[in-house]
């Protein structure tokens, strides 16, 4: 099973998402600890009628993701959150036009 | 300010009757423009109501539910479980639980169109959601765009205003071209508007300009769908689902035909209440789970 | 040595005449429907003020989004290159140049010779440039030049959807109906823009001195918000919107010497 959540947006300047697979995520918060921008947090998501604690992008940053995440150079594939995750549950889609 | 004017209404499937032992659940979906409530008896739609949200969303939740209840004889404590969802899902005070609108929308689409639905594109007044789900309506991948107006009802309204075409006609007007023009080069509505004015000065007709803009918007929405994974069957919901210019161009962009809209006037279910139906279905499942333990 | 720099922007064309390393005159025209014609107008205006004719000019370099359309240009230079040259000319210690125009914003990192080393561009989304402020001013029913002073009266920013010009416009209209404070709305608009621009600059690294140019640099509201977000002082020249044309004119000097 996969439960892939894309946090971010696409607009005239390109597409920018932090992607989290809520099925793979174990809620360990290592990505949150590594993030220098306070972009990530833990939330409860209803999965198969149970609340599961998983990582997510904060509400304030969802529309700001291009600016919040760009200092970490997400297009390189080595953003700190991605490197911190042992489950490979988080990755970045970064395509400026 | 609404972009697709629709009538407030409520409906009861009066051939159903409820009894106290039934699992009666309600879902309330408070959106930025419309508030919807659906009442289910043992997981089947019994009644629903749709109304404008206005400025006070906790009040809208109660009003929407009251309206769905009107004429049914039900009172609020007859409900075994109430689930709130939508934009203001935290503002459904009578709800037992709040669940994300994405999950509720997928469940509702599965109810309305059946287990063959895998991809849902919901285009509203101010946001676009692309959802991929399985045969039970469980979400497997999704994205929500509410950062950029391109493709939303609000963006279309900017063009309807610019070209002085009534909003309910922009679909058919955009199809009134001999040959499909290339899409406008700017996705951004503000810049596309400037580009459109340039095209009008070059002698392009309103129809051709609208077609070029709609073409660009359809490509954008197609890309959002591809990002979550396009799989048949595909359905389009939300206010823009009534824009035939957008629907036909998305089908072309993706190479897939979407399932037709059920005609709710004919005792079918309006896709606008998909979220509320999904919420009420979750309510039933959560109630049954609680009973088991 | 007399050179001319032309900056063909999406909204306005600017021209600068440079003689022996000093700015002699400037000219400006709306880009409108015929940018080439407007460019000619801007150049003619500047030459007239300088009392030169085109034959006196050693080299003309064009920059800006419409640079290919410049009439009588001997060469072109990227906007980033022009910004770097102008920044260091105006402020010799400048190492980070921020240029916020009508439709595009960019940040440029340069060395002490005004040679561009790295840059970040923010384009194709109106919320990232001057177009955002203009649209919000219209929605607020305030003159563009009054937006800055108005915003300085506010202590806080109202919560508006500042991620998109179109959504922002609807939000502003709703807030006005609810009689919310216009200064707070204006401040929210500048704070949102400053937030985006400063994040963009952080991508390059903020190397002092930091110089701000482009039409939006004239706006006191934006400048106040940007200084707050960057937590560093920002230098602004007297004619910030002419920086691109000035940079192009400086490049023209180097190019004239080569030939």
Image: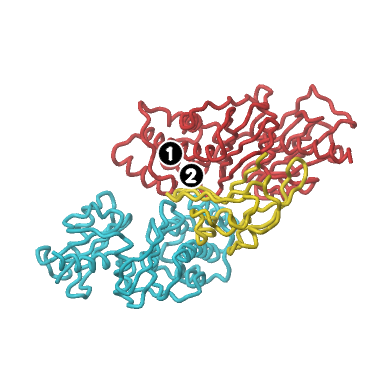
Chain colours: A yellow, B red, C cyan
Both labels 1 and 2 in a single chain:
yes
Instruction: Indicate whether C220 appears above or below B92.
Output: below
Q: Residue at x 81, y 31 (%)?
A: B72
Q: State which chain disc 2 sits on.
A: B
Screen quadrant of the N terminus of chain C: bottom left
Disc 1 or 2, which lies upstream in sequence? 2
Chain of the residue displaying label 1:
B
Left/right placement of residue C34 relative to residue C87 reads left
Residue in the image at 20% along x and 71% along y: C18
Residue drawn at (19%, 64%), measured in percent from left and top?
C45
Query: Mark 1 = which residue?
Result: B216
Quadrant into which the C terminus of chain C falls: bottom left
Instruction: Count residues near mark 1 (Cα–Cα under 10 Å), then give few for <14, some for 14-19, many for 20+.
Output: many
Q: Nearer the viewer, residue C250 or B91?
A: C250
Residue furthest out toward the left: C55
Q: Position of residue C146 (x, y in %)?
A: 44, 66
At mark 2, the secondary structure is loop
Horizontal arrangement in the rendering, residue C119 relative to residue C185 (left or right): left
Tag 1 and tag 2, C-beta contact below 8 Å: yes
Residue B150's place in the image compared with C119, above or below, is above
Could you classify mark 2 by the number of other residues whose Cα lies within 10 Å: few (under 14), some (14-19), or many (20 or more)? many
Q: Nearer the viewer, residue B161 or B232?
A: B232
Whole-percent x, y for residue B140 in the image: 64, 39
Q: Where does residue C237 sit, x and y in percent of width and height?
A: 34, 74
Q: Helix, strand, or loop for circle 1?
A: helix
User: Would you identify the image quadrant in which residue B234 lies?
Assistant: top right
Query: Residue placed farthest to the front in the image?
Result: A86
Q: Which residue is mark 2?
A: B150
Quarter of the image for residue B293 reads top right
């Amino acid at each position: 099973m996969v439960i892939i959540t894309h946090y971010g947006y696409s607009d005239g300047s390109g597409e920018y998402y932090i992607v989290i697979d809520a099925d793979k995520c174990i809620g360990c918060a290592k990505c949150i600890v590594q993030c220098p921008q306070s972009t990530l947090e833990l939330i409860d998501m209803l999965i198969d009628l149970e609340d599961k604690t998983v990582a997510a992008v904060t509400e304030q940053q969802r529309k700001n993701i291009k600016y919040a995440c760009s200092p970490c150079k997400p297009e390189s594939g080595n953003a700190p959150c991605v490197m911190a995750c042992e489950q490979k549950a988080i990755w970045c889609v970064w395509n400026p036009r | 300010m609404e972009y697709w004017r629709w009538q407030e209404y409520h409906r009861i499937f009066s051939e159903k009757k409820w009894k106290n032992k039934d699992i009666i659940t309600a879902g309330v979906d408070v959106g930025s423009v419309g508030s919807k409530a659906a009442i289910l008896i043992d997981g089947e739609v019994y009644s629903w109501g749709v109304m404008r949200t206005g400025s006070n969303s906790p009040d809208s939740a109660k009003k929407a539910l009251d309206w769905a209840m009107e004429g049914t004889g039900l009172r609020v404590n007859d409900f075994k479980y109430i689930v709130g969802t939508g934009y203001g899902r935290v503002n459904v005070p009578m709800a037992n639980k709040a669940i994300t609108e994405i999950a509720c929308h997928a469940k509702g689409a599965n109810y309305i169109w059946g287990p063959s639905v895998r991809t849902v594109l919901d285009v509203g007044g101010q946001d676009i959601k692309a959802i991929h789900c399985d045969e039970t309506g469980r979400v497997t991948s999704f994205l929500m765009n509410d950062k950029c107006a391109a493709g939303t009802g609000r963006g279309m309204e900017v063009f309807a205003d610019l070209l002085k075409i009534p909003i309910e006609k922009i679909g058919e007007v955009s199809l009134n071209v001999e040959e499909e023009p290339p899409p406008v080069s700017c996705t951004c509505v503000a810049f596309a508007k400037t580009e459109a004015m340039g095209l009008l000065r070059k002698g392009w007709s309103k129809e051709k300009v609208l077609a070029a803009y709609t073409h660009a918007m359809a490509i954008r929405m197609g890309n959002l769908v591809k990002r979550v994974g396009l799989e048949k069957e595909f359905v389009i919901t939300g206010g823009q689902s009534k824009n035939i210019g957008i629907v036909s161009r998305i089908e072309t962009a993706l190479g897939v035909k979407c399932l037709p809209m059920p005609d709710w006037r004919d005792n079918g279910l309006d896709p606008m209440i998909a979220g509320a139906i999904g919420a009420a279905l979750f309510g039933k499942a959560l109630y049954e789970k609680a009973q088991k333990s | 040595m007399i050179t001319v720099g032309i900056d063909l922007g999406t909204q306005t064309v600017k021209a600068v005449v440079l003689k022996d390393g000093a700015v002699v005159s400037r000219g400006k025209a709306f880009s409108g429907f015929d940018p080439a014609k407007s460019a000619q107008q801007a150049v003619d205006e500047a030459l007239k003020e300088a009392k030169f004719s085109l034959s006196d000019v050693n080299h003309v370099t064009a920059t800006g989004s419409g640079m290919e359309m410049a009439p009588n240009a001997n060469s072109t230079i990227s906007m980033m290159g022009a910004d770097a040259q102008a920044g260091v000319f105006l402020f010799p210690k400048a190492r980070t140049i921020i240029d916020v125009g009508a439709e595009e914003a960019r940040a440029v990192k340069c060395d002490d010779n005004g040679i561009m080393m790295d840059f970040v561009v923010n384009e194709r989304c109106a919320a990232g440039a001057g177009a955002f402020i203009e649209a919000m001013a219209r929605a607020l029913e305030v003159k563009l030049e009054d937006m800055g002073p108005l915003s300085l009266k506010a202590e806080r920013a109202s919560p508006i959807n500042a991620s998109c010009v179109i959504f922002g416009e609807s939000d502003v209209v709703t807030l006005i109906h609810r009689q919310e404070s216009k200064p707070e709305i204006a401040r929210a608009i500048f704070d949102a823009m400053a937030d985006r621009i400063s994040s963009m600059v952080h991508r390059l690294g903020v190397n002092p001195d930091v110089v701000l140019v482009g039409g939006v640099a004239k706006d006191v509201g934006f400048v106040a918000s940007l200084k707050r977000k960057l937590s560093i002082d920002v230098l602004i020249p007297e004619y910030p919107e002419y920086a691109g044309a000035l940079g192009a004119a400086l490049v023209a000097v180097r190019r004239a010497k080569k030939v």
